[in-house]
Image (cartoon, rainbow, N blue to C red):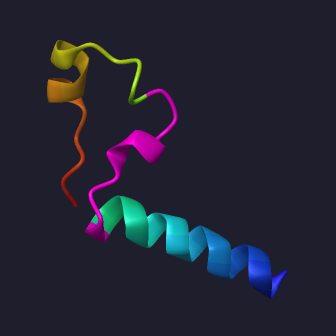
Amino acid sequence: MILAAVILIFIGALIHFGKMYNLIAGYNTMSKEEKANYDIEV
């Protein structure tokens, strides 16, 4: 259970700090216009 939490926190940090937005489901398949509308700023 703790291992799962650590993995999810690590993936969240990669997305937020590493700017790996391609890890977000469906982000790679979006058009440029849809990506522009997606709020990735926190």
Residue 42, by quadrant, is: bottom left
Residue at position x 52%, y 74% in the image: 10
Residue at position x 46%, y 66% in the image: 12
Question: Does 29 sit left or right of 17 as displayed?
Answer: right
Stretch of the chain drawn in magenta = 17-26
User: Most prominent secondary structure in the magenta stretch?
Assistant: loop
Residue at position x 41%, y 18% in the image: 29
Residue 32 x, y percent position in the rendering: 18, 17
Residue 23 x, y percent position in the rendering: 47, 46
Residue at position x 32%, y 64% in the image: 16
What is the quadrant of the N terminus in the image?
bottom right
In the image, residue 23 sits, relative to residue 18, either above or below, namely above
Residue 6 x, y percent position in the rendering: 65, 81
Q: How many marks can you see? A: 0
In the image, residue 2 sits, relative to residue 35, either above or below, namely below
Residue 15, by quadrant, is: bottom left
Q: Is residue 20 magenta?
A: yes
In the image, residue 34 sits, relative to residue 15, either above or below, namely above
Residue 7, by quadrant, is: bottom right
Residue 3 x, y percent position in the rendering: 77, 82
In the image, residue 35 sits, relative to residue 19, either above or below, namely above
Question: Does 16 sit left or right of 1 as displayed?
Answer: left
Name the residue at the right extreme. Answer: 1
